[in-house]
Image (cartoon, rainbow, N blue to C red):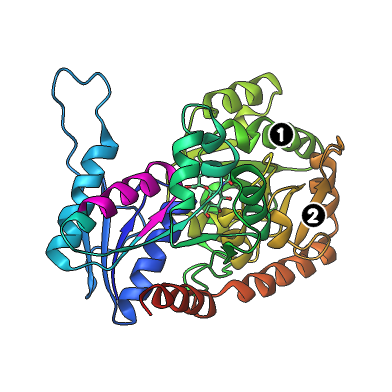
Amino acid sequence: MRIATLCYPTYGGSGAVASELAMRLADRGHELHVVSYEHPFRLEAFRPNLSFHAVTIGDYPLFRYPPYTLNLTNKIIEVCEEFGCEIVHSHYAIPHAVAALMARDVLAERGKRIRLACTLHGTDITLVGRERGYFELTRHAIHKQDLLTAPSRWLAEATDTDFGTKPGRVVAIPNFVDLQRFRPQQDCAARRLLAPKGTAIVTHISNFRPVKRVEMVVNAFAVLRRRMPAVLVLVGDGPELPKAEQLARELGVRDDLRILGQQQPEPILQASDLFLLPSIAESFGLAALEAMACGVPVLGYHAGGLPEVVEDGISGILCPTGEDLCLGSLAAGLLADRERHARMRVAARARAEQFGPDGIVDRYERLLQGLLA
Ligand code: GMT
């Protein structure tokens, strides 16, 4: 197959999934063309069968807001014509699914037929896509795709409810994790660098958007910190990060925060004892899966697609939504019970092993090949 993959390049689950899938399909002999405005962070520099095409963004003074979707559409047309791509696979519907649809029309006029696949990732359906300024076009573009996938049954059902897709039209294919790269390594250098021996290391990795409820992470940490020596490691960046820092100051735990910005997550996860992800709703929670693959139990809420990844009481703890349970007390209880914590570490890794790449890439490959049959 010759596939053009559209994705966001920045730190975030959808760009990571798009890049990992593109690399693995390329390893299987397919030709992959990744299109984005920057080189995606998870896309390795050189790989046979895989190339990256940057979207050039125009800056004509008349445009207060450069029309990125037009530049992207133009690039899709060029790439499909030059390399004979047969499939355009969008990751995150906005604006990729719309741009792919416009490119299909242009290419059809020139006698070239392409197929459209779109992997919905989360807020493209649950937040942004529902906004009035995006809803109609997003719904149209979603309905026009030849193949729709989502990383959880929960997101597939949310798409049916909010965008009127027929049940079964959105195929749930879970995200996957590189089990070699993300693996337990408890006595690692990062642990010694982050905190003195005997200090619990609690981690949160995200893009620090309101949906992540970072204030809950800090509140929980403050409760935990009163019970035992602990540090909270924050990885990533986003608009809620300054608020998290301010709250930590107010709660008297600022000195126990390690704000690391954007980082490769593996060494930090390998050094961690617990991963906090109290989001309003994650479609999947790729960061949680990566933590589990490193043997780190996850603490969060029974919301969105997270229960399809974390087994409550086994590989982590999921509090019922709507109940104001104290995450901090739960964290402290788990970390104080060394045997339970050790069991959960093992269970977290075992659960992550069910999300290894091979079987999941097989499912994508079969569905994409089905588009060309
Ligand atoms: O939807 C987003 O907020 C962005 C997106 C991303 O690009 O990071 O995250 C979503 O896609 C990930 C990959 O499929 C999932 O693991 C995340 O759970 C999901 N985020 C949300 O649903 C909030």
On screen, residue 25 above or below 301: below
- Disc 2 residue type? Ile
The part of the image, by quadrant, that contains residue 55 is top left
Could you say which is closer to the camera, residue 120 or residue 270?
120
| Residue neighbourhood size for the residue with mark 2, other residues' Cα within 10 Å, grouped as few (<14), some (14–19), many (≥20) | many
Q: Nearer the viewer, residue 61 or 234?
A: 61
Q: Position of residue 354 (x, y in %)?
A: 63, 75
Q: Secondary structure at mark 1?
A: helix
Q: Quadrant of residue 24?
A: bottom left
Q: Residues within 10 Å of mark 1 (few under 14, many from 20)?
A: some
Residue type at mark 1 is Met
User: Which residue is labeled 2 in the image?
Assistant: 317
The image quadrant of residue 248 is top right
Residue 38 at least partly seen: yes
Label ID, residue 1: none
Could you say whether the residue bearing mark 2 is in a helix, strand or loop? strand
User: What residue range appears in magenta?
Assistant: 89-106
Q: Return the disc, 1 or 2, that comes first in the chain's sequence.
A: 1
Residue placed under numbered mark 1 in the picture: 216
In contact (CB < 8 Å): disc 1 and disc 2: no
Q: Is residue 53 magenta?
A: no
- Give the residue drawn at x 45%, y 60%: 17
Q: Examine the rendering and report whether any part of residue 197 can be seen.
A: no
Left or right of 46? Residue 18 is: right
Q: Residue 16: horizontal and vertical position, in percent?
A: 43, 57
Type of secondary structure dominating the magenta stretch:
helix
Q: Is residue 99 magenta?
A: yes
Quadrant of the image containing the N terminus: bottom left
Residue drawn at (50%, 39%) of the image: 207
